[in-house]
Image: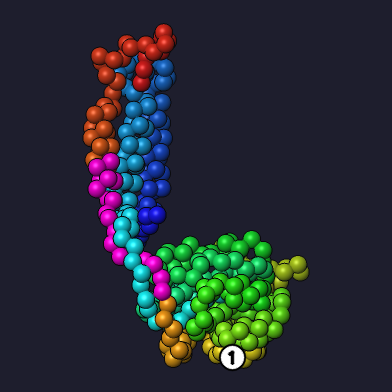
Amino acid sequence: MDSFRFAHPEYFYIFLVLPALVFLFLFGRILRARKLKSFGEMELLEQLMPSISTGRPIIKFVVWLLAITCLITALAQPQFGSKLTLTKRKGVELIIALDVSNSMKAQDIKPNRLERAKRAIAKLTDRLKNDKIGLVVFAGQAYVQLPITADYASAKLFLESITTDIVPVQGTAIGASIEMAMKSFSPNFTGSKAIIVITDGENHEDDAVGMAKKAQEKGIVVHTIGMGLPQGAPIPLTEGSSDFLKDKSGSIVVTKLDEPMLTQIAEAGGGSYIRANNAEVGLNNLFNEIEKMQKTEMESREYSEYNDQFPLFLGLAFFLILADFLILDRKNKWLKNFRLFGTNKQQS
């Protein structure tokens, strides 16, 4: 089976321009309609301007949006894998368990705990060479966000999509995240394995220490990184909001880093505890420890050659631009009296 990928997915950020274009188009249509109404009744104006079409500008705009979509997709360089090869490498397997509970929106670490953690994970991914990485997200429950892989580009893509809304049940089930991470390693891999739990550790709901001990007994090292500061910070209801989460009595909730718990988890898992701060998260220090772990030869089948598919999208974009030029803003004088299915209404 062919493997599909985008060589430059960063160009998809250009899609953020499209809503602005739609807004400007609709705003322009509203202004135009108001100006026409100021001249008189619309029915009378339509009789005075029989060649004016209300539908064609909309069609032309939609055609332009489709053309821009095709151009952006072409820039992202879609590719199909064409040659599958067996690759051997020496490395370790690493699972990162990332807390996505609401408390991770606190801004005692800038811009907030979650975003700072995501940036650190992305930088760690850039340093990996022959290792495999997986990603588990958790709040009140734990889910596999990214199965164990050596595709670092995909890992960073999955990472960007993580928000505090990705897990519906709130809480901090650290034990469940460790258990899920233990199940996420490659079934036949017998080499070095490590779990890095990134959390503020607050309001933990299960036996995280006991689960870390089980992981250590299976030869899996569990490290913890504490996101946040001991004095804590309030939790914004929305990004950039000055409204904060309050308890039942109306007092602002302050979320604090639970360092004793995270230290116990790391000790039980045979790993290290590191507290993040505004200067660094600490993944680089853990990376150095992971680099010291015994490397094991791993085999994986990967696509070594890819065929570009962007000419298809460029061709489609050119066709749509050509179609836009052929679609006139005004009604065609040769076709304006054409009646479909016997209707007496002029076509737009």
Q: Is residue 49 above or below residue 252?
A: above
Residue 284 percent across, percent down from the top left:
43, 85
Residue drawn 67% across the image and 68% down it: 140
Question: Magenta span covers which residues?
Answer: 299-316
Residue 329 seen: yes
Number of numbered discs visible in the structure rendering: 1
For the C terminus, give its image quadrant.
top left
Type of amino acid under label 1: Gly
Res 333 → quadrant = top left
Mark 1: give few (<14), some (14-19) or many (20+) Cα within 10 Å.
some
Residue drawn 28% across the image and 51% down it: 309
Q: Is residue 203 left or right of residue 271?
A: right
Residue 279 seen: no
Residue drawn 40% across the image and 30% down it: 33
Residue 345 percent across, percent down from the top left:
41, 13
Residue 7 percent across, percent down from the top left:
31, 60
Scheme by which the image is coloured: rainbow
Q: Is residue 300 magenta?
A: yes
Mark 1 highlights which residue? 270
Foreground residue, 219 or 39? 219
Res 196 → quadrant = bottom right
Foreground residue, 161 or 38? 161
Q: Is residue 82 above or below residue 268?
A: above
Residue drawn 51% across the image and 67% down it: 147
Q: Is residue 6 above or below residue 139?
A: above
Res 54 → quadrant = top left
Residue 258 percent across, percent down from the top left:
64, 84
Secondary structure category for the residue under label 1: strand
Q: Is residue 194 magenta?
A: no
